[in-house]
Image (cartoon, helix red, strand yellow):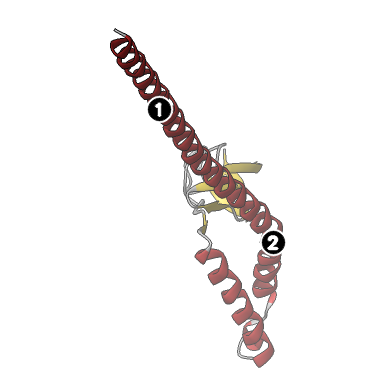
Amino acid sequence: MEEEKKIEEQKNNTEECEKLKEEYLNGWKRAKADLLNYKKEEAERIQSFAGLLEEEFISSILPVLDSFERAEKDIPEEKKEDQYCKGLLQIKKLFEDFLRTRGVEEMKAVGEKFNPGLHEAESVVEAEGFLKDTVTEVVKKGYLIRGKLLRPAKVKVAK
């Protein structure tokens, strides 16, 4: 009788240990899954933040490209073969290549229908050969980064 009691007690202890083991193991599995999910979410947050920083940086240097483009327009035809002008234009090309490798692309606007999500109207003008609400001229180029608007194009729109 005494022995049966001990055996029964040991069975109960073994069952209780098995239950605790399962509880602890499941808790550990949940904690591990939570940690993996946290790491994944944190990596995505860091990636998103890095993307925002890159966009901010590129937005802040776009005026440099604007200056290169104005300078290129102002170079007289007879000076375009000058070594200094060629050097300036090569720097502009390197700058454009740098932006392209970062996913930046220039928006095409002339002839497109005015889109307030992509364009900023500077003025409305009379223009022959253009339909109403069509972009006739780009005053300041607009850019996309990886398909997302980086800077809207400042444009003139046909009446």
Q: CA distance from mark 2 to mark 1?
A: 60 Å
Is 14 on the left or on the right of 38, as rendered? Answer: left
Which residue is found at the position 46% from the left and 37% from the top? 32
x, y percentage for residue 85?
Answer: 66, 85
Residue under label 2, please give it.
61
Q: Mark 1 sits on what residue?
A: 21
Quadrant of the image occupied by residue 9: top left
Is 101 situated above or below 129? below
The kind of residue on which mark 1 rests is Lys
Q: Residue furthest top?
A: 1
- State the image coordinates of residue 61 (x, y, percent, origin top left): 69, 61
Residue 117 image point, x, y percent? 55, 37
Which residue is rendered at x = 44% and y = 35% of the image? 33
Can the viewer see residue 127?
no
Q: Amino acid at mark 2?
A: Ile
**On the rendered image, what quadrant is the N terminus found in?**
top left
Question: What label does residue 101 carry, if any?
Answer: none
The secondary structure type at the circle numbered 1 is helix
Callout 2 crowding tier (Cα within 10 Å): few <14, some 14–19, many ≥20? few
